[in-house]
Image (spheres, rainbow, N blue to C red):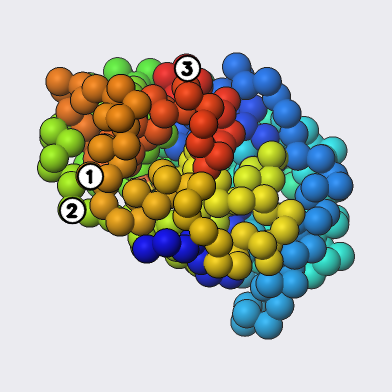
Amino acid sequence: MSELHPPRPFSGGIILSYKCNLSCKHCMYACSPKWKGDWMSEEDALRILSQLAEEAKGKYHDIEVVGVNYGFHFTGGEPFLKFDLLLELVEASSSLGLPSTFVETNCFWCRSDEVTWSRMEALRNAGLKGILVSVNPFIVESIPFERIERAVRVGLKVFDGNVLVYQRLFFELFKSMELKGTMSFQRFLDEVGGALHYAELIPTGRAPYKLGHLYTKHPAGHFFGTSCRQELLRNWHIHVDNYCNYIPGYCAGISLGDARNLDEVCHPSSLKRRPIVKALLSDLRNLYELGKKYGYEEPEKGYVSKCHLCLDIRKHLADSEEFQELKPAEFYSHIED
Ligand code: SF4
Ligand code: SF4
């Protein structure tokens, strides 16, 4: 394979910033309070949103419906840390006709019914179709569960049922435990840790480093012979970050180009200057070999997943600052925050 030819996107997430008030153990994007705190500029956002709106035209049967991989969501980091920007971009998306828009939040700001109602109403009046409420054992380490329950209760009314509770399993579990306030991860493990087996936990980003001890590990060779062609070249969900990196699927730290120019990103281009993507499109073994050339050493403990192997090698390669596809560079320094 000598060319990269990403398909046109169908749905996606707009990462307004990697800055977050939390630093969750499972965060795929390694968000935390330690990031510099850059936010997407309005100018870049408008260029990106207008192209995505054009792209989505005629592809959505119902622009009022939202789904985890259906429509376009504003995310982070935590988008409510800059509510004014969020509101402006929702207004802009609405006038551009971007379908099925929603915002994802950890609910830190849902301190009272009044505040929750007024912010949600402002967003709905600006054209937002729904909200995704994050619920998991890592967020409730810091966010009192009452705020999450409040966001769901108020959201269901304001957005006329368009509330995605992700993940519902944990929401129901915490309700059945009558959880009040926060809960340490250790307490979660002690009391209901078995629930983790039923949860969707994407083993990339910070998770392999912070939660790896809970999972079986394998040597690198275990993952040889597999490629990431499907993940890198899928059209059903992409992300664009505040630096305008066009991120395939959930592969944080990999950029396929400048999202301000969608035609260029989705046009066939040579893989010559993208050796990491080239390796990933063929066989993880090739990425491993590339890492070795740059002095990468396999850890004795092994890896929990192919994404762990991939990320660990990329983290090493990112130090050389030679690879244009490893962006944003800051991502690689916050994986173990
Ligand atoms: S998972 Fe969400 S809430 Fe947690 S650090 Fe990442 S962006 Fe923030
Ligand atoms: S191994 Fe790397 S490229 Fe493949 S899906 Fe995981 S993070 Fe993406």
Q: Mark 1, residues whose alpha carbon is within 10 Å: few (<14), some, or many (≥20)?
A: many
Give the answer, above or below, for where 313 lies relative to 118. Answer: above
Asked whether the residues under the numbered discs 1 and 2 touch, taking CB atoms below 8 Å apart as contact, a structural biologist would say yes
Local secondary structure at mark 2: loop
- Cα distance, mark 1 to mark 3? 28 Å
Instruction: From the image, state whether disc 1 or disc 3 is nearer to you.
Output: 1
Q: Label 3 belongs to which residue?
A: 337
Instruction: From the image, state whether disc 2 or disc 3 is nearer to you.
Output: 2
49 vs 250, left or right, is: right
Q: Is mark 3 within 8 Å of ligand 1?
A: no
> Please, what is the three-letter code of the amino acid marked with disc 3?
Asp
In percent of width and height, residue 30 lies at 49, 29
Q: Label 2 belongs to which residue?
A: 225
In percent of width and height, residue 187 lies at 30, 19
Report if residue 149 is visible in the image.
no
80 vs 247, left or right, is: right
Q: Earlier in the sequence, mark 1 or mark 3?
A: 1
Q: Label 1 belongs to which residue?
A: 285
Q: Quadrant of residue 124?
A: bottom right
Give the answer, above or below, for where 313 lies relative to 231. Answer: above
- Cα distance, mark 2 to mark 3? 32 Å
In percent of width and height, residue 35 lies at 62, 21
> Please, what is the three-letter code of the amino acid marked with disc 2?
Gly
Local secondary structure at mark 1: helix
